[in-house]
């Protein structure tokens, strides 16, 4: 069989050279051009089996030409590369029918693998329609590699109904991502309905989700629709899914397995046409171990896992995000501010435990509370540290270590409560001791910089006992030389 021919379009000569060498080495035939006009002539003339193209070229923007290419050659896979790396680039590439989007700089091996995969794809798959939503709004800000991975994953999921589980610390943008999945996906004309499991009394969650018949329980004076019914044809966002009570989990599992549900107090099964997006800032695997989350439900929800990184892991997004929030508050009528020298550096040094939400609130405070046009580094420093004091003031004894027995007692009371009238699964003693032993051993190892002899001494246990515990509890030992 003749080698597949790859058409490469990029106005950067170095990229053309590197790409054509890698593709030739991988056994493909290659033609290169620096402009869209030539690429279009080749494509319209039926040449090439796959296109790799940059977005912006001297004679235009590939996104203006892509729909025409798709109409003329629906079977031709187009891989788009871009250094713009924004959410909208990934989304546009997906909407205009590109096979894949690769942010620059890219890994050559990965690109060749994408080319191979695209060429092996059944033609009918490539012909699948792309929608033509044209929104230019930029819902997600940040161009860090971590966010680009998220954008690419989102772009791939837009045209599917797959269940998505978004994890990430509080304030990392989980709800925003869920909304973007809906707004740019094929259900965008349907409703987006959100429900927060932590915000609803536990005994009302089932009727909130599935609705209830008149008289289903005391106080149910009329039939009420549930969120599943309200989200029909659209997306249901289940926020804080880790707080869902067990009985509701069982019901939800049944919907995911059978595509049907019954309202509380009702009998007739109702077919659910709803895409589920769930989110949590808890470690669901840990909840499974504690017997508080159904493992089978976890696997049903975790079809596509999306982990949103905390802001401190993508601090390079800070400048873009800060600019974005200053512009936002200005649009809302607050005065325009500029950041003084060193202000961003102060922000970069902060660890942002409240993530993007904390940054957004900081920008709002800085814009609303201070009359001066320029926000200096000192002002930022002051606001960040007074916010820290405000937040820790609510903690017991002003942040001092709390009494261990009292903490365990409080934890156990919550734990038992979470099972309502039922008892937790057996094996409680072992589970609780493990939870206490793990941080104890990790802390001893951290304090002795990973020296197991010293750690055993500190704990007052035999070295072999410590070694066994490290293995059994899966404690990570990091030795540091300092
Ligand atoms: N990448 C981003 N670009 C722009 N705004 C963002 C981004 N990420 C988060 N935000 C903003 O930060 C705030 C917090 O985001 P969001 O509510 O989606 O977080 P969350 O992870 O769902 O938080 P929680 O777990 O506490 O519910 C929102 O106002 C959101 O608009």
Image: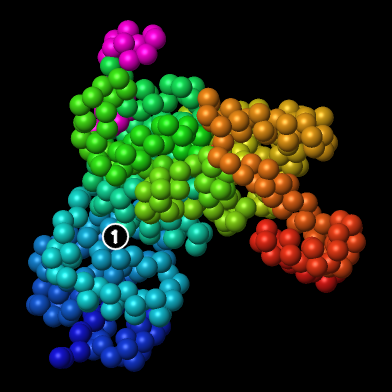
Local SS, label 1: helix
Q: Quadrant of residue 64?
A: bottom left
Q: What stretch of residues is rendered in magenta?
A: 214-232
330 or 22: which is nearer to us? 22
Residue furthest to the front? 426
Horizontal side of residue 275 vs 294, given as left or right = left
In the rendered view, tell whether residue 481 sits above or below residue 276.
Answer: below
113 or 37: which is nearer to us? 113
Measured as percent of width and height from the top left, residue 28 is found at 26, 88
Measured as percent of width and height from the top left, residue 39 is found at 20, 75
Going 35% across and 58% down the picture, which residue do you hit?
90
- Name the dominant secondary structure of the magenta segment: loop
Going 37% across and 53% down the picture, which residue do you hit?
303
Q: Residues within 10 Å of mark 1 (few under 14, many from 20)?
A: many
In the rendered view, tell whether residue 362 sits above or below residue 285.
Answer: above
Please give the residue where the numbered disc 1 appears in the rendered image: 93
Measured as percent of width and height from the top left, residue 217 is found at 37, 13
Quadrant location, the C terminus? bottom right
**Residue 395 in view of the camera:** yes
Quadrant location, the N terminus? bottom left
In the rendered view, tell whether residue 213 sits above or below residue 427.
Answer: above
Going 20% across and 35% down the picture, which residue do you hit?
271
Queried on whether the Cβ of the residue with tag 1 lies below 8 angstroms from ligand 1, the answer reads no
Going 69% across and 50% down the picture, which residue do you hit?
434
**Residue 372 in view of the camera:** no
Looking at the image, what colour scheme do you see? rainbow
Horizontal side of residue 127 vs 20, given as left or right = left
Q: Quadrant of residue 335?
A: top right
Measured as percent of width and height from the top left, residue 438 is found at 72, 53
């Amino acid at each position: 069989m003749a080698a597949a021919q790859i058409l490469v379009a990029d106005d950067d000569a170095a990229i053309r050279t590197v790409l054509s060498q890698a593709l030739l080495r991988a056994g493909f035939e290659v033609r290169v051009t620096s402009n869209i006009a030539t690429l279009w002539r080749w494509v319209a003339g039926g040449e090439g089996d796959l296109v790799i193209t940059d977005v912006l070229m001297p004679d235009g923007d590939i996104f203006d030409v892509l729909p025409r290419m798709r109409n003329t050659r629906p079977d031709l896979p187009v891989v788009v590369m871009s250094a713009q790396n924004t959410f909208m680039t990934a989304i546009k590439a997906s909407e205009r029918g590109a096979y894949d989007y690769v942010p620059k700089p890219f890994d050559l091996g990965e690109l060749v693998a994408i080319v191979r995969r695209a060429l092996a794809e059944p033609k009918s798959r490539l012909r699948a329609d792309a929608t033509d939503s044209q929104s230019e709004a930029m819902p997600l800000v940040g161009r860090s590699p971590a966010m680009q991975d998220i954008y690419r994953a989102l772009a791939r999921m837009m045209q599917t109904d797959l269940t998505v589980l978004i994890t990430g610390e509080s304030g990392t943008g989980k709800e925003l991502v869920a909304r973007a999945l809906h707004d740019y996906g094929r259900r965008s004309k349907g409703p987006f309905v959100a429900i927060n499991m932590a915000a609803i009394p536990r005994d009302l969650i089932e009727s909130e989700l599935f609705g209830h018949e008149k008289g289903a329980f005391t106080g149910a004076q009329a039939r009420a629709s549930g969120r599943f019914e309200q989200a029909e044809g659209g997306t249901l966002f289940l926020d804080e899914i880790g707080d869902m009570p067990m009985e509701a989990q069982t019901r939800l599992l049944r919907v995911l397995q059978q595509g049907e549900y019954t309202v509380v107090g009702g009998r007739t099964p109702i077919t659910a046409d709803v895409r589920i997006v769930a989110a949590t800032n808890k470690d669901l695997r840990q909840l499974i171990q504690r017997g508080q989350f159904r493992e089978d439900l976890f696997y049903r929800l975790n079809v596509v896992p999306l982990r949103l990184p905390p802001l401190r892991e993508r601090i390079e997004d800070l400048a873009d995000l800060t600019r974005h929030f200053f512009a936002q508050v200005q649009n809302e009528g607050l005065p325009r501010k500029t950041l003084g020298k060193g202000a961003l550096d102060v922000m970069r040094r902060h660890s942002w435990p409240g993530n993007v939400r904390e940054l957004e609130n900081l920008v709002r405070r800085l814009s609303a509370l201070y009359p001066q046009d320029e926000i200096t580094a000192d002002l930022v420093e002051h606001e960040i540290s007074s916010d820290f004091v405000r937040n820790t003031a609510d903690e017991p004894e002003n942040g001092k270590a709390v009494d261990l027995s009292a903490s365990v007692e409080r934890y156990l009371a919550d734990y038992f409560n979470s099972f309502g009238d039922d008892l937790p699964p057996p094996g409680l003693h072992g589970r609780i001791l493990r939870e206490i032993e793990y941080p104890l051993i990790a802390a001893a190892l951290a304090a002795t910089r990973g020296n197991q002899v010293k750690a055993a001494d500190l704990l007052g246990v035999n070295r072999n006992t410590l070694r066994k515990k490290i293995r059994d509890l899966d404690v990570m030992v990091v030795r540091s030389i300092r």
